[in-house]
Amino acid sequence: MSLALAKLQLVAIVDACREQQMLCMHLFGSALLDDFNPTRSDLDLLVEFQPIESGALVQAYFGLERQLAAITGQPVNLVIADAERNHCERGIIDASKQLIYGFVE
């Protein structure tokens, strides 16, 4: 993984995920490449929320996006796992993603 986060940032990310009712979050895309440039790229994150009402989901989504950008100092692009319908794109994401928060069965 090319993205280096300090321990305090990782703790803050875990706290944000818990606060915003996350099940899991994966990093994917350019942040995993050796030539990742934080001055040019955003962080692409595949997220899965706990089952919540749609209004609460919208608040959790944008709340998490703001919190993660503040923690990392980078623009954040959140992709909701269930919303990615393009099978080709989803296959690329699944092949490269790395777990940041949560667990995998």
Image: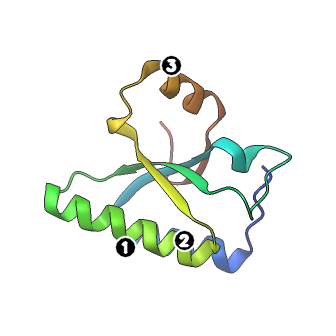
Query: Where residue 24 appears, x then y in whole percent?
Result: 45, 51
Q: Nearer the viewer, mark 1 or mark 3?
A: 3
Q: Residues within 10 Å of mark 2 (few under 14, many from 20)?
A: some
Residue 83 versus residue 41 in the image, above or below: above
Q: Nearer the viewer, mark 2 or mark 1?
A: 2
Query: Where residue 71 appears, x then y in whole percent?
Result: 58, 77
- Disc count in the image? 3
Tell me the amino acid under the disc marked 3.
Answer: Cys
- The circle drawn on residue 3 is none
- The circle drawn on residue 88 is 3
Q: Residue at x 85, y 47 (%)?
A: 35
Query: Where residue 91 appears, x then y in whole percent?
Result: 54, 23
Outermost residue toward the top in this view: 88
The residues tagged by marks 1 and 3 sit, at their Cα atoms, a distance apart of 32 Å
Tell me the amino acid under the disc marked 2.
Answer: Ala
Q: Which residue is mark 2?
A: 69
Query: Where residue 56 appears, x then y in whole percent?
Result: 19, 64
